[in-house]
Amino acid sequence: ASKRNDRRVLIYSHDSFGLGHLRRCREIAHALVEADKKLSVLILSGSPIIGSFDFRARVDFVRVPGVIKLRNGDYTSLKLYIDVEQTLAMRASIIEHTAKIYDPNLFIVDKEPLGLRGEVETTLKLMKKRGTPCILGLRDIMDEPGLLAPEWERKHAVPAVKRYYDDIWVYGLPQICDPLKGIGLPASTRKRMTYTGYLNRTLPQAASHPHLEKISGPYLLVTVGGGGDGEEIVDWVLRAYEADPDLPIPRLSCSAPL
């Protein structure tokens, strides 16, 4: 990055499904600007509802065309009626050009070492050419080793980690879980793994707290996270109560944005 008085961080948010990745990247961005008053953070995301989130001063986002993962594992464009490869090409171009102009002092990539179908690799090459440190951020629990190892082999993830990344941040504790257990990382790469501890979650300042009637006895709580794949669960619960209105356990359902 060029010499200047401010500092800049660019975060790539893996966003093909759900809200977890975006919420994690948002919390990281907020923690960084809180710790450094001369720091700005820019988040790259394809989440369709990123504009609904509140962001602190000096945190902003660039919305790339959305992609969603289907139940069979394939990907498709979220909104555009075009081939997914064209969508991915646009995403890769936007990501690279944003990094080129924004010129960050640090580049953080969420979960996927090369991004969705390798869309971040050209940007990683640019960052390494400019001498910009690159960080791979991982949640503390990934898939089982028997599932993750072949996935990482198919995606050429280990060579990418060795080639492009200066450090690996694991958002958790080593006493709880090693997310890369069973992955053939060389010892020199494992030495670059840093366990950050768990992220501090905060509620939005303007969050509303609707008054709910107090439930004194047992009840069924229905919650589906972001809601992207929760429709079937909610549907089956509603069917059960429609089939037998006299079910003795009351139900409380939490809606989801997706």
Image: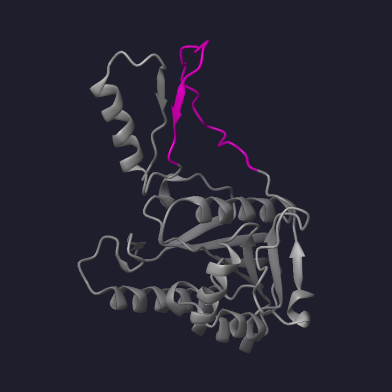
Counting the numbered discs, the total is: 0
Q: Is residue 157 magenta?
A: no
Q: Position of residue 63 (x, y in %)?
A: 41, 62
Q: Position of residue 215 (x, y in %)?
A: 49, 13
Q: Position of residue 234 (x, y in %)?
A: 34, 35
Query: Which quadrant holds residue 173?
Result: bottom right
Residue plotted at (47% across, 16% down): 211
85 or 157, nearer to the observer: 157
Boundaries of the magenta span: 201-224
In the image, taking residue 41 as reference, residue 243 lies left or right, namely: left
- Outermost residue on the bottom side: it is 129
Q: Is residue 217 magenta?
A: yes
State the predominant SS element of the stretch in magenta: loop
In the image, taking residue 224 as reference, residue 204 lies left or right, namely: right
In the image, taking residue 82 as reference, residue 28 lies left or right, namely: right
Q: Which quadrant would the N terminus be assigned to in this image?
A: bottom right
59 or 150, nearer to the observer: 150
In the image, taking residue 125 as reference, residue 224 lies left or right, namely: left
Rendered view: 208 above or below 73? above
Residue plotted at (39% across, 50% down): 49
Residue plotted at (26% across, 60% down): 79
Q: Position of residue 227 (x, y in %)?
A: 39, 44
Colour pattern of the rendering: one colour
